[in-house]
Each structure stands twice: as structure tokens, then as C-alpha cells.
Amino acid sequence: MESRAVYRLSSKISDYICLTKPKQTFLLLLTSIFTYVGAGGDRLDVLTLLTAAMVLSISGTTAVNMALDADIDSLMGRTRGRPIPSGRVSREEALSFGMLLFALGVAVAYLINLWTAFSTSLGIVFDLIVYTLWTKRKTPLSIVFGGVAGAAPSLAGWSAARGALELPALLVALITITWIPAHIWYIAIYHVEDYRAAGVPMLPVVVGIERTSRIIVLSVMVMLLSEVALAVIGPFGPVFLVLALPSTLLLLYRSVRYAKNPTVEGARRMYKTASPVEGMAFLAMAVDGLIRLLL
């Protein structure tokens, strides 16, 4: 009996962890930390608070998001095994869990400064209200608003380091916003029938894969220009460009080639090409910032 109870408890804990999408949470956390370092942040106490605020707020927002999207997830083959659609966790449990986490996250962010708390709250509002509740089921451009939510951790990292949101911070956010279409729409092309069955108006469902692939090319071009602008405006310099540009240029090149002959099967390869590009850009910021700090 005791071993069975332990198993049930461990399974429940595992399901709650699954609600937070640990991989996604970790990647968004890294964008915040790397931006903090790249923007000149050098205080361990602030970095510790920032890490806690991001883990709590991102995890909580993700859990609430999964509760709100449970009906869609139940209709899609790749998501119907998640904790809520499968019945292992109720929507009410997920909502309570998520709301507690993101409330704690905003509170911790407030301990850093108001701008960090604002940026954290901005991500929550755009993710849950603007993206999930308002636009996701109505417009194929919903991921643009979702991109703002994805960029919020970097804004929080910048404001934690500098005490304000400045023009370079907006360019950093634009990197995420313009990377999101490649990250999301390529996998949406690959799973286009899933989205069509669930009634989600993803761009490939609405306009087809050919037009979607051309729009992705334009988005990647803006991402590339944002990286160059960051080096021109500062504080990032040649080190950032040397590390960030190659992967973005590779993505642009392959996106152009794919757009000439787009296929559902090829979209998965493009998704894998796009996935590490944002990470390389933010890693480049951190390396550039560390070099400036040491010099």
C-alpha cells in the first residue's frame, strides 16, 4: 500500500512538472539570463532573483496555458497524452497551480525593480489573454502576439541589469518575435492536418504552406537586421556578430531554398534548423557581455 501511494505521489508530481513544459521554461529562462549578462548585469543576488522570478512566472503561465488549451490538445494526436486531456490532472488543479506560480514570480520580479516586474507581467498578459484567449482561435497572426510573450523574459533580463527598458532591449525582443514564425510555423506545416482538425487557424491552414514559407523568409530577414542593428546601436559589438550571424544566415539561406519548393516533410527539417538559432543569438549576447565585463 505504501509503495502504491508513493507511486501515485511521484506520478502526480511528474504530471505537475509536465504542466510547466520544463524544456520550454529552461530555454526561455536562458534568454533572460543571457540578456542580463549581455546587458552588463554583474550582481549575483539580482541574477538569483531573476532566475527565480522567471522559473516561477514562465512555469505558472505555461501551466495555465495548458489548462486553457486542454480542449484543443485533446483533438491533436501529438498533445492528447498531456496531463489534462488524459484526465490525470484537472483543469481546476492546473489553473490553481499555475496562478500561484506566476503570482509568486511577479512578486519576486518586483524585488528587483518595477521594470522587471512590468516585463514579467507583460509576458503573462500577452501569453494568456492576448494570445491564448483572444487571438489563437481567431487569427493566423496570433503567434506574433505569442512572440511578445516569448520576448518578455529577455526584457526582464535587460531591465534587471539596466534598471530600465531601452531601445536595444526592444531590438533584443524583436529577435525573439521574428524567430517565432520559423519556430512555430514550420512545425505547424508538418502537423498541418492536426491543426486543421482542431480548428486552430494556423497560417499554413489558412493560406497554405507556400505563402507561409515566404512569410517566414521575410521574418528571418528582419531577425538578421535586428542583430546587425544591435551591433550598430550597442552595447553589443563584433563578438556578438561573429557568434550570432552565421546561424541566422544559415537559417535564411535554407528558408529561401525551402520556400522555392515547400513540402510537409521538409518542414520538420526546417524546424530543426530554426530551433537553435535564437539560442545562438542570446548566447552571443552573453559571451559579448562577459568579454566586455572582463575587459
Image (tube, rainbow, N blue to C red):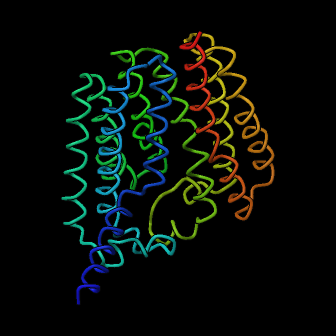
Q: Quadrant of residue 248?
A: top right
Relative to 43, say whether 72 is above or below.
below
Of 32 and 95, nearer the camera is 32
Q: Quadrant of the C terminus?
A: top right
Instruction: Residue 202 in the image: state x and y as whole percent.
Output: 51, 56
Instruction: Residue 40 in the image: state x and y as whole percent.
Output: 47, 16
- Residue at left offset 42%, top offset 57%: 21
Q: Quadrant of residue 85?
A: bottom left
Relative to 173, say whether 18 is above or below.
below
Instruction: Residue 198 in the image: state x and y as whole percent.
Output: 45, 69
183 lies left or right of 257:
left
226 lies left or right of 80:
right
Instruction: Residue 271 in the image: state x and y as whole percent.
Output: 65, 53
- Residue at left offset 59%, top offset 66%: 191
Relative to 207, say whether 122 is above or below.
above
Q: Quadrant of the N terminus?
A: bottom left
Q: How many marks?
A: 0
Of 188 and 295, nearer the camera is 295
Q: Residue furthest front?
A: 2
- Residue at left offset 75%, top offset 48%: 259
Q: Residue furthest bottom?
A: 1
- Residue at left offset 51%, top offset 36%: 177
